[in-house]
Image (tube, grey):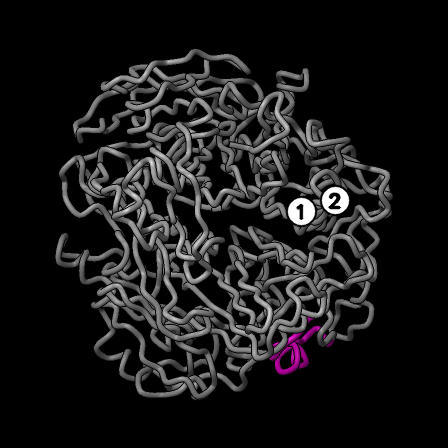
Amino acid sequence: MSKLTRRQILTFFGSSIAATALAPSLERKLFGGGSTIAEAAPLSFTPVRLPHPLPIYRQQKSFLPTGIGVGEIKAAANDVRLSQYNILDDVVVPPEYERYLIVSWGDRVFPNKDEYFGYNCDYTGFVGSANDGYLWVNHEYVSFPISRFAPEAPEDVVGSPETGPLVIPGFPTTKNRELLGEFLYNMGGSVVRISRADRRGKFAVVSSDPKNRRIHGLSGLKINRQRSDGYQSVTSWGSKSYQQGNENYLTSTGPAANEVFNLSSDGLGKKIIGTGFNCSGGTSPWGTILSAEENFQGSAAFFVGVTETVKPDGTQTAYSEGTTGTEFGLVGEKYGWIVEIDPANPGFRPRKHTWLGRFRHENIALRVQAGKRLVAYMGDDRRGGHTWKFISTNTVSNPKSKSNSALFENGTLYVAKFNPNGTGQWIPLRLNSPTNPIPPSTLASVELAALGSAQRNGRLVLPRRNGIAGQTTDGGFFNVDTTNEATALPDYQGKKLSDFYTSQGAILCDCYPAGNLVGGTPTARPEDIEINPRNQREVFISYTDGAPGSDGYPDSRIFVVAKYSAAVNETQQSGGLYKIIEDSADSTGTTFRWQRFEQGGEAGSKSGGGFGNLDNLVFDNRANVWGVTDMSTGTHNGFNIGAAGTPNTIDHTATGNVANLTGVFGNNWLFYIPTSGQHAGEVVPFAYGPPRCEMTGPTFVGNTLIISVQHPGEDCPFSPKVTLSREIEILNLNGTLFNQNRSVPRGSNWPSNIEGNPDGPPKPSVIGIRRKGSSGQFV
């Protein structure tokens, strides 16, 4: 288990006087910005009892759920093993709190009652007062059980009920243009006004507000009629009013808009049809939302997408057969960006800022100070993806001025290079930037030394170019690894990005291989990045999974990419919580230091923090850290997806990629890390979600936490109900093994089951969580 000292914990969270801070009666300067926080009282809530052991259960009583809304209080004890655990189909919160629905997929909350709230809710952003304002909600993707034709639906769910026709009358049940259009309509985002009478009340949607609206994957489809490439007749996807297409297209700014989109085969220039694949994001101080387009890459299996690969001029290599991009004429280079939306102003045309780069965006975090240049941090959520920073050319006048949007239109994008000694550099992506890729044998050196081989042979993805490394075509990706680096890598070294791309805009359309070209560090899937509110030089990063994959190989000198020995308590690869500390006072410099606070993995493993696959982060108004997990749906509770619910192998003696070990954690959950008080730095479980779901997009609005519950019951039948049971091998806190009998619903009926329909369809939703009978602080 983790051996962090209290001094290390306080230092990580920004204390400049860590030694003094150890005295519990003293006020603590936990953050370098100079703000003083008084010593906090013991926990003000009862932590939720999860299936696996955590150190907090030795110190505090815990709440073990036994039914919907009920449970038992377990006393603190030295032995925190549970021999039996029954998973509930609900959002479980501490007994001092309550959760309630705000809005769900399919809700008719828009002026046009044909329209409905989208699927798979993710990031939430709020603009307004403490009791009234506009909520933006991302809709990331579609998955079974919305339709048996959803991308990558398990083969054995054919014949199982689909939720699309149950929730949306007339939802198509055959795979045709209408269904593909509905898939794209269910993505993008929703703007809804929410309000409550006072701080003691619950938020509810004001469905009569005329500003409530959808911005989705086919917004502006009607502009296809301006084309001459064969798509001019593709302006609708069905007979309903919202399916007719409209003129609500998006626009774009920056180099790609001026140097690439003018070359796009759609002939639409800066105009863009829709936004989709929207994962996390950020909210600007001037009241706009920055929504992050993530998994836009289309393929035969993951067909709701567009072409990712581009040519040297930044335009797509070709339409990808069988994808929604091909069906509707969506050119790939126009997706994979950060999109700015003004929820309170329908007259503001959403725009994609291309200086922020095209990659699989997870989120964005802003540092906005008057008289300083704007700084934005972003992550590319893929295996081997990079950590990024944008610095504007011009400076901020008033942080709350809408004119700050123009700062995204000129600047420089940098990729992070992490050195093993704890230092780092920001490398600019400019035409004159020299190329110096990290050799695959270096990236994989730790795994090679430990196991004698490396997953994917340390794969490094670089741009394919005619005449480079024996290639005969231009465009797309070329894999360099330990088997060919001696012959292939020299052709990529000692050049400039201008030798591979025709313009700055083209570089920005191909950030991932371009970042590898200049020597950026491939990382362990950066899921979320947040700036320390008390010391803005500090940037917290959740890296969700160190395992390599087809996309690339994280640098094993920086990240744990595998389980390196057969010892049952060996360090696990489940990502971790890291921090960058900028050397420059205003964060615009090109050097930094980095630290790892907590490694993912069971608390009984070496360096394990007691969580798996850390995802979204958020700071509350007392600068405590909140985090959610994003364990792959197919590993939850040790059962694979599909009707069969086949048990996964969980073997703590295995080496290499041990992704199935996350099954010990149960459902995805929400935790709290206090940054002051006697539990500073400890992982404290606060809530867990329904089976197969992901809890995402936490946003604090006064005394309420607003959070999405994405894809409950994903890729599993919800009817008939089936309970799965198995023995699961778990690490105790002392690093030894014990077995637990786990029972879990195969799929989910949430939130229908808390609305009086116990056998009803699962629906992605947004909920509020608040303390019972209180209008004060959340914790």
Secondary structure beneath disc 1? Answer: strand
For the point 54% across and 26% down, which residue is it? 91
Residue 646 quadrant: top left
Foreground residue, 94 or 630?
94
Label 1, label 2: how far apart the Cα atoms are: 7 Å
Q: Amino acid at mark 2?
A: Gly
Residue 743 quadrant: top left
Where does the image place residue 287, in percent across and percent down from the top left?
69, 56
Q: Which residues are magenta?
A: 252-267
Q: Amino acid at mark 1?
A: Phe
Residue 472 can be seen in this image: yes
Asked whether, in this view, residue 184 is left or right of residue 378, the answer is: right
Q: Which mark is residue 274?
A: none
Q: Which mark is residue 126?
A: 1
For the point 46% across and 29% down, which residue is it? 686
Q: Which residue is mark 2?
A: 133
